[in-house]
Amino acid sequence: MARYDRAITVFSPDGHLFQVEYALEAVRKGNAAVGVRGTDTIVLGVEKKSTAKLQDSRSVRKIVNLDNHIALACAGLKADARVLINRARIECQSHRLTVEDPVTVEYITRYIAGLQQKYTQSGGVRPFGLSTLIVGFDPYTGIPSLYQTDPSGTFSAWKANATGRNSNSMREFLEKNYKETSGKETVKLAIRALLEVVESGGKNIEVAVMTKDHGLRQLDEAEIDAVVAEIEAEKAAAEAAKKGPPKET
Amino acid sequence: MFGGATLLLYVTGMKFDTSGLESHGLLIGTNNELLSGLSTAPSFDIPSTTDFDGFQKEAIQMVKPAKGTTTLAFIFKEGVMVAADSRASMGGYISSQSVKKIIEINPYMLGTMAGGAADCQFWHRNLGIKCRLHELANKRRISVTGASKLLANILYNYRGMGLSVGTMIAGWDETGPGLYYVDSEGGRLKGMRFSVGSGSPYAYGVLDNGYRYDMSVEEAAELARRSIYHATFRDGASGGVASVYYVGPNGWKKLSGDDVAELHYNYYPVEQTVVEQVMAET
């Protein structure tokens, strides 16, 4: 076995880790992903590039379960995602085995972020090229959480966030329009954010909703289309209302 | 070079992450280049002896009878009651009458000592460290379930190597009162009433007879005290002081520590009788 001890991620003279920054570039080229935390619901949405006709779309799930009460969506290199997700799933079960308790969202986020950081400070490996959005409910208190990690290994909690392609516009939209929501309103907010950067339509976005009692549920195309139609109707009504009243003065 | 477990991932695909089962903090986190790709099971210096298997059996046999003690714990309506004697014996010699057999792991969790005193003290202290680290990392206290599981996993790793530990972990966590029995064979049991040690059969007799779930703290303390007293009365390896601790929602509190000889005269006061006076005259 050759000795993999030569570091690839090294500091530049002005204090940058270029490999990590290039990894962030890879993330920026990945598909858009958004997460919104409501009071009793958490929604993850991901842009879906049109699947090839012969491809079985069920095998390209972009929003996955880490455990019954935790889900993850990511943007960036999909192959790296698979490896990271598998490690996280094992850690979830390992935690259940050693302390007879499901993981908290914060714990598994810390684990994933720790893993991403380890690969920026080890010989012979490159950083993972993905940012993740991790959502879930605390197993005891039932409080919903949304966390984001990135290739450098940092993580933080968010009320709503976006990553991947055009994430800046989505985040701006969320900052302008975020308010405490629950149930269907949370789903609408997430889809509205995605529609800012994605072509409209149920076949271009994948949405999953997590609730405390029912775990993760993927919305099917028809449901997404229904919500999209509602959103468009609301937009049209808002436009009409803007043009209407001034004529009376 | 990062830890062996992750390197194996590149070679064989998936390796079950056993870091949670690692026995002591010394090995976790050390990026040992010498390990390069081999399993990260903890490694120990093997004693240099001609008869390795037989040597271990001798060590175990020497330590086996030494669970000379009486400890008990039970859950009731108000929390957990924990009690123990304080005698240490080496064969027929009483080496101490004032051993602390109830170990304070942290302000809301207690462990009892039966078996090897050194083993119990060391591993309980180690457990206390692990519990504290868990608190710092997760910003919440560890559950009694989790703490007992950590200890049981450690002891399982050393199974067959001569550790002698028969302990009960009692505490109060988010889910209420918790009581687990953990031993050096690797066993771990959840329960409402336990007694461990050479005096346990006697203690069980009194405890099982007098137990009711809805007792007050005073009644439960008296039951615990009486059970320990009766065990020390009949078992030669138990004696000294009967300590009683109570674990409630705000943590543990020591309720009493009574010399069992004095307790005897409390329960069975001496009465002057005619017969004794006659004996005195001759």
Image: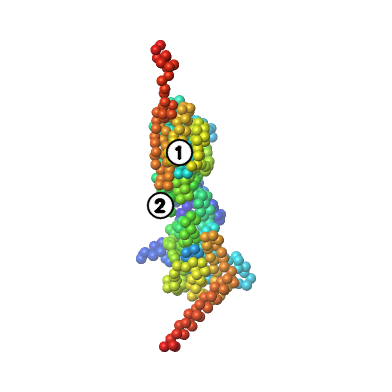
* Residue depicted at x 50% and y 44%: B153
- Residue lying furthest front in this view? B274
Q: Amino acid at mark 2?
A: Leu
Mark 1 neighbour class, 10 Å CA radius: few under 14, some 14 to 19, many 20 or more? many
Residue A154's x, y, as percent? Answer: 42, 61
- Residue lying furthest left in this view? A14
- Residue lying furthest right in this view? A54
* Residue depicted at x 60% and y 65%: A59
* Residue depicted at x 45% and y 44%: B78
Residue B5's x, y, as percent? Answer: 50, 52
Q: Earlier in the sequence, mark 1 or mark 2?
A: 2
Q: Measured along the vertical axis of the image, is residue B77 above or below residue A16?
A: above
The reply to whether discs 1 and 2 touch (Cβ–Cβ < 8 Å) is: no
Q: Which mark is residue B136?
A: 2
Residue A211 visible (yes or no): yes
Mark 2 neighbour class, 10 Å CA radius: few under 14, some 14 to 19, many 20 or more? few
Q: Measured along the vertical axis of the image, is residue B201 above or below residue B155?
A: above
- Residues at marks 1 and 2, CA–CA distance in whole angstroms: 34 Å
Reading the image, the residue beneath label 1 is B220
Which one is nearer the viewer's eye here, A125 or A60? A60
Which one is nearer the viewer's eye here, A107 or B246? B246
* Residue depicted at x 47% and y 52%: B3
Question: Do discs 1 and 2 belong to a common subunit?
Answer: yes
Check disc 2 and report its element: helix, strand or loop: helix
Q: How is the image coloured?
A: rainbow
Residue B50's x, y, as percent? Answer: 51, 32
